[in-house]
Each structure stands twice: as structure tokens, then as C-alpha cells.
Amino acid sequence: MNNQVRVPQEIHSYLWTRYLPETAYKTYILIGYLQQENKTGKVAMDFLLNANIKEENTIPQILQEKKDVLKKLGYEYPKNIKEDLDLLLSFQLIMEVADSKGDTYYIQSIPVPKLEEVLKLDDEEIKNLKNIRFEIDNQKGMDMILTMLLNGNGNLGVTLDYIYKTTKVKLTEIRAVLSYLVDEGSISIRANKAIDKLKKEDKLLIQINEAVFHQKRVVL
């Protein structure tokens, strides 16, 4: 159904997907589908409440992180479609309306609210969101550099120019990604100057810090 229903791009660009369990996200999509099909009132509610929505992507680490994030913000992880709907209402992503007969049903909220308009985000969570946006904006560089590291069994002794020629990633992005991975603790780097000062010919030794790397870098 995801391929048939247009999901508002703000759900992804605002990073609402960080806070939506799989079943809540699917419920949101289903509500959009019912709107698209002009299903209202009792027909829409019966279809929605009888939908067999299941959680399929159950990577333990991802699932636990989602539960922890919701708990920190004061929300329970939903266990059924009613709780999915309650969560979507709390997030102001859907609203309850009534048809001409007075029968209530749900529609998607437009415009989609921004996270900070709804959620109480502390400094740690704001930083987490900043990191997620960095990874999205630098996805190619992240993927290419991480692939190089994994292919090198977690150790690389190379020049910046070698990384550039191998990955075809801009030098500024390479430096930014390396700095990011060092800051989060996934890798350590030995070089004769700071990462942001590295030039093409400078050599660096990169090593994966396995405990942090495998915690932070989940293969989806």
C-alpha cells in the first residue's frame, strides 16, 4: 500500500519516523489511503479497526531504541491499533472528524506539524536529531567510507587522496564524515594534524572501535 499512497514528505523530512513505531506508521498510511479512496464515517472506521496491521521489522536494537525514545518523551509503545491511533492523535499527525451522519473517522493533519511544535525535546534529543540529519545529508559519504573500513577489516592506513579516489566523495564531505565518526566514538584516527586540516597527501590510520561501532552502526 505504501507504493499506492502519497505520504506527506514532512513525515520524513521532519524526522517523525524516528518516533513512529512500525504499526503506527502503517496506520498513518492506511488513513491516507482511506482519504484517497474517499472512505468516510463508519465505512472508514470499520476498515481501519479491522485492518491486520503487524510489526514485521523486529531488529531488537532498533525496536528497543524506539521504545526508549518514546518512553523518554512520556509515551507508551503501542500494543494495538487503538493505541497506535492515540499516539498519532497525541503527535497531532491525524485528527478526528465526522461525516454528515455524525459518524467519526480519522484524517491526516495538513500541514504536518514540526517536531518542536508537539514534542518536548531536551538537549540530548535535539543533538540526536542533528546527528540523524547529518547522516541523511551525507549518506553517500557515510556508506562509502564505512564500506572501505569494513572491507579493510576495521583498519585502514591510507592517504586522504586514496579515500577520495576510491569513493569519489568530496574532500569536505570526507573530512566531515570522519570527524563525525570520531566524535561518536565509532572510529579512532591517527594523523599528524587535525581532521579538518588534512590535505590530500596526508596519511591517516583509521581503526574501528568495535564496541561503539556495532552499537551505533546497525545494518538495516
Image: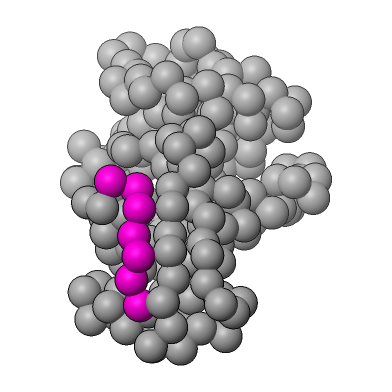
Q: Residue at x 45, y 29 (%)?
A: 62
**Is residue 101 one of those drawn in magenta?**
no
Q: Main secondary structure of the magenta part?
A: strand
In the depicted view, which residue is nearer to us: 152 or 164? 152
| Vertical position of residue 117 compared to residue 25: above or below | below
Q: Residue at x 43, y 60 (%)?
A: 206
Residue 123, image x and y in percent?
Answer: 79, 50
| Vertical position of residue 39 compared to residue 109: above or below | above
Q: Residue at x 52, y 72 (%)?
A: 191
Whether residue 199 sits left or right of residue 92 in the image: it is left
Q: Is residue 138 visible?
A: yes
Residue 7, image x and y in percent?
Answer: 36, 51
- The segment highlighted magenta reads 153-159
Instruction: Give the colour scheme of this rendering.
Output: one colour
Residue 107, image x and y in percent?
Answer: 47, 40
Q: Residue at x 73, y 32 (%)?
A: 73
Q: Is residue 53 visible?
A: no
In the depicted view, which residue is nearer to us: 81 or 115? 115
Q: Quadrant of residue 200?
A: bottom left
